[in-house]
Amino acid sequence: MYTYNHHSDSGFDIHEIFVNRSRSRVLLSYIGVVFLLANVCQPFLSKEGLSSSSVWSITFGILVAKCLQYKPVRKESVVIMPTFGVQLEIHFWSGKVHRRFVPIGKILKPLLNECVTPVTCYWSLAFLLRDEDELMLVFQKSHPPVKMLVPVWKALCKFLNSEYLAKSSVSKLKSFLSQEHPVLSMYCNWLERTPGIEFYRNR
């Protein structure tokens, strides 16, 4: 039902989960909708009231249409942008794309959760966010298997750890310069605050 794809583009690490659409499921879904409409319109066209058999037919049509309804999502993507954050994308079959950007400073930790409901059990990938009480689901419209979530989770952990280590190294260097070389430390601080040479921060 799901297909996983991983590639890089322009320095961005992209993980995609494709939702495989079943033609037979879509066809049965449309048949269920037509059957439902036919049962609803029949009593009004024949100028008769709703009988018990009509009510049962309408109820059955609703259940068929609901159970066979396919999701209009084509794929969901996780785009890891170094030094910036993570962009979550939902691509629909209609061509519409819904994007959410999560800054790197907002993400505390990616989590793999096992979700248990009265009728099913599945795994989900979520972000633990700073100053937020609720988790943010990475894949909101689909429930891919855990074997597809693990590589995305590992990539997110690696990305967040590398960013944390980079920030930690910069802070340690600044602390060392401020103690051992105060003049050089003042010069570096001046470079950071000077417009036009902000690229020194990432070097």
Image (cartoon, rainbow, N blue to C red):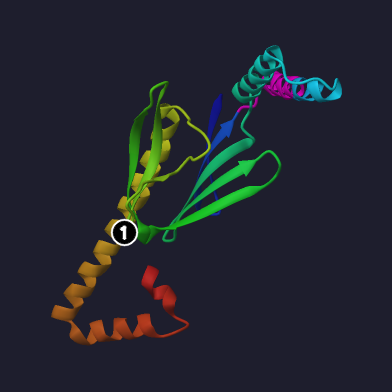
**Residue 90 spot, x, y in % from top left:** 57, 44
Asked if 77 appears above or below 181 in the picture, the reply is: above
The span shown in magenta is: 20-36
Horizontal side of residue 95 vs 113, given as left or right = right
Asked if 18 appears above or below 162 in the picture, the reply is: above
Foreground pick, 54 / 66: 54
Q: Residue at x 35, y 48 (%)?
A: 134
**Residue 165 spot, x, y in % from top left:** 27, 57
Regarding residue 203, the answer to whether it shows in the image is: no
**Residue 166 spot, x, y in % from top left:** 30, 60
Regarding residue 87, the answer to whether it shows in the image is: yes
User: Label 1, on which residue?
Assistant: 131
The amino acid type of the residue labelled 1 equals: Asp
Asked if 173 appears above or below 47 in the picture, the reply is: below
The answer to if 33 sits in the magenta stretch is yes
Look at the numbered disc 1 and give the secondary structure of its residue: loop
Foreground pick, 185 / 138: 138
Foreground pick, 113 / 79: 113
The answer to if 43 sits in the magenta stretch is no
Q: Quadrant of residue 66?
A: top right
Which quarter of the rendering shows the C terminus?
A: bottom left
